[in-house]
Amino acid sequence: MIDEHEAIEFFRNNPDIEVLEAFVIDVNGVPRGKWIPRERAVEVLTKGMAIPRSVYALDVWGRDVNAAGLAEGTGDPDGMCFPVPGSLARISWLKRPTAQVLLYMRNTDGTGFYGDPRQVLVTVLERYRQRGLTPVVATELEFYLIDPVRSALDPVRPPNTREGRWHTGQTQVLSIAELQDFEDVFHEISTTCRAQAVPADTTLRENGPGQYEINLKHVPDALKAADYAVLLKRIVKGVARKHDLDATFMAKPYGTQAGSGMHVHFSILDEKGRNIFVGGDQPAETLLHSVGGLLQNMGDSMAVFAPHANSYRRLRPSEHAPTYASWGYDNRSAAVRVITTSKPATRIEHRVAGADSNPYLVLALILDAALMGMNMKVKPGGEITGDDHALDHEPLPTNWDYALQRFSKSGFAYSALGPAFRSLYASCKQQELSEFSLRVTDVEYDAYIRTV
């Protein structure tokens, strides 16, 4: 909740604000909500706002998923949503002066609503709290700047540089010149992040044409880390649109160019604030057991790490996107990269999830798998060097249908996310998969319409 004095003070300090954009994050990571006029904004901030519970169980096209059990046959009741503390802020990309607030849903008894992805992560973090442990988490998000989307047949094209030339197939990774080409965009992203208290850190040019990455700082609150990730995606998309561009976090917008991932860095602190991953001359057992838990449950988690049909185009060899449940020291070819360069900053980088994934669900599965690994003392097996994967490393599902089947039957997903949410998520994804099975692609027409 937001204190009434805080809400009144915010609007006193922002007298030009006309509307409040209040939203939740659905199962696909999509913001969904309402515009509230200024006159009602304090009431919403202090007393909450009703939103249909079924908003959390929509497919990626925004349609009800009846099999999820929140819409058809239920009367489609409302749930009460309340502001996430610290999320009330101005946004910079709309013409009308606008504020925003992120919401979460509660049941009538005050407990979190099971269908809210944010609540899923809350439940996992409670398991850490009970053990006196605190995850410290940061995310890195890759995305493409593209020309404004014109049509489904011609959807992606790199933007012009200042010289008016098209980006070519050159990678130009870490190019300072190409950051400067879009200085105005990145400057406004940076200033908006500061205004919204989103702890953005480094910005860099990535491998694909018009591809960039923004890193978020490590924070000792995994729930906040996920909030920051979803808010950063809104900022990037909103600011790009203001500057006559689009930004996409689609996992693989160009078939022959690099995909976009969401890398997750984390360490774990004990009750005295000590990093339990730090060992002596040898790696700490807690670190290795965490890696073991991550690898053991990675295949069952792929339907969340790679949630869409397009996600699996990113998971190809030699793409810096993992295809095996493997680990290694400072090795970006591995699914799990262990970083021990600076002992106090010893941490794990989980490199599997796409930028198109839901940050709350990704963090929930990663952290629960690590905790399970510590509890069960799971050994990770041998590390890889280079990109040579040993035979004992499990190939990851690279097919959406198979990944969803594994997830739907997974005991790990059942315990980590809860049976009700596992069923809800699987129902949403199954509806999307069924829709794709009905769509005939242009490649099929090109190959078969006249030749067979």
Image (cartoon, helix red, strand yellow):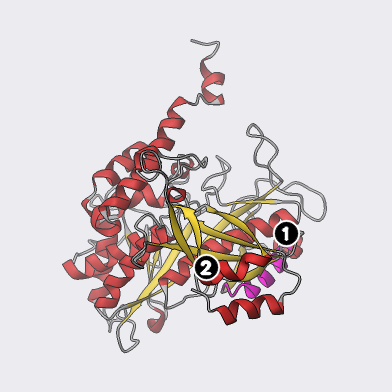
**Residue in the foreground of this view, choosing between 206 and 12:** 12
Residue 189 visible within the image:
no
Position of 57 relative to 86 (above/below): above
Q: Residue at x 59, y 58 (%)?
A: 206
| Circle 1/circle 2 CB separation < 8 Å | no
> Mark on residue 280?
none
**Residue in the foreground of this view, choosing between 328 and 394:** 394
Between circles 1 and 2, the one closer to the viewer is: 1
Q: Residue at x 46, y 25 (%)?
A: 438
Q: Which residues are magenta?
A: 185-198
**350 left or right, relative to 92:** left
In the rendered image, which quarter is residue 385 located in?
Answer: bottom left
Instruction: Determine the CA span between mark 1 and mark 2.
Output: 20 Å
x and y, in percent, of residue 105 in the image = 43, 61
> Mark on residue 228?
2
**Residue in the foreground of this view, choosing between 7 and 356:** 7
x and y, in percent, of residue 262 in the image = 48, 58
Q: Residue at x 71, y 67 (%)?
A: 188
Q: In terms of secondary structure, where does tag 1 sit?
A: loop
Query: Dot 2: few (<14), some (14–19), or many (≥20) neighbours within 10 Å?
Result: many
**21 left or right, relative to 71:** right
Residue 280 visible within the image:
yes
Residue type of the residue flagged with mark 1? Leu
Residue type of the residue flagged with mark 2? Tyr
